[in-house]
Image (tube, grey):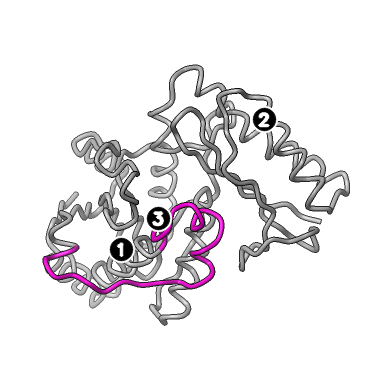
Amino acid sequence: MRIIEHIEEMRSWSETERRAGRRIVLVPTMGSLHGGHLSLVRDGKRRGDRLVVSLFVNPTQFGPQEDYASYPRDFERDRGLLEREGTDVMFSPSAGEMYPAGHQSYVEVGKLGEQLCGVFRPGHFRGVATVVAKLFNIAQPHAAIFGEKDYQQLQVIRRMARDLNLGVEVVGHPTVRAPDGLALSSRNSYLSDAERQAALSLCRALNKAEALALAGEKESGRILDAARAEIEKEPLARIQYAKLCHPETLEDVEKIESEAVLALAVFVGKTRLIDNTVLKA
């Protein structure tokens, strides 16, 4: 596996591979890799000839009171995991490489970035869209894979790629869960044992909503009430939002017409977790 830290070297490698007719797949990550990331990596191996995995904790998507400084980082462990998965390139630039002095250009994705998490994390999706646009321009992939656990992020990136004609196929990969149902996340490492058990209220809420939808319930209010009630049973859990949304626009819906996304953001102790499921009428 080749480790690349500089933009021009990464671009040169990709240009060479493209000229040789090879299909490049990118998996963007912030490191602290877990089984969910590795599932994306394996998907990427199947979808192309060359796989690039980026490791970059992006400062522009963190707010001033958020966990940028403490976000889990373990370069050597991540490198070993990616080598074992047969990754071709690990692109690991510094913050100064990606955002040199004087940087002032950003990408905004309108309403999609202002809903759900965007209400509580102003500027977050501007940072996400900007860094992903930069990674697309640097690594020049034919396709890029993102986890569906970060559903809003996936929709923002799809919209950006379409609107800016970036020519990258944006692929969503199903959420990977632990055997007990908790969605895998780097921030799960923040949870105490008691909080880890309380965090299961999110997947129980999603399961309750899915059961209601399968039984024919379409009304947003009834589905959201049931999901919230499941989470509120846990004293360590505090709901930031629970929304039933259109799967592409992310606007609130009053009832499920064909499909709708139930999106959750919940604090368990001090750790903010997100999860979602797509409900069908």
**Residue 259's x, y, as percent?**
73, 60
Residue under the point 33% across and 62% down: 49
Q: Which mark, by number, is residue 44?
A: 3
Crowding at label 3, few (<14), some or many (≥20) Cα neighbours within 10 Å?
many
> In front: mark 1 or mark 3?
1
In the picture as drawn, the residue positioned furthest to the front comes out as 65
Gap in angstroms between the C-alphas marked 2 and 3: 38 Å
Q: Magenta residues: mostly which secondary structure? A: loop
Crowding at label 2, few (<14), some or many (≥20) Cα neighbours within 10 Å?
some
Residue 194 falls within the magenta-colored stretch = no
Give, as a three-letter code, the residue at label 1.
Val
In the picture of the structure, the residue carrying the numbered disc 2 is: 232
> In front: mark 2 or mark 1?
2
Where the C terminus falls, by quadrant?
Answer: bottom right
Q: Secondary structure at mark 1?
A: helix
In the picture of the structure, the residue carrying the numbered disc 1 is: 131
The magenta region covers 99-125
| Left or right of 81, for residue 229 | right
Residue under the point 17% across and 67% down: 13
Residue under the point 51% across and 35% down: 267
Gap in angstroms between the C-alphas marked 1 and 3: 20 Å
Name the N-terminal-most of marks 2 and 3: 3
Gap in angstroms between the C-alphas marked 2 and 1: 36 Å
In the picture as drawn, the residue positioned furthest to the right comes out as 216
Crowding at label 1, few (<14), some or many (≥20) Cα neighbours within 10 Å?
many
Vertical comparison of 263 with 183: above or below: below
**Residue 29's x, y, as percent?**
33, 50
**Residue 85's x, y, as percent?**
32, 43
Q: Secondary structure at mark 2?
A: helix
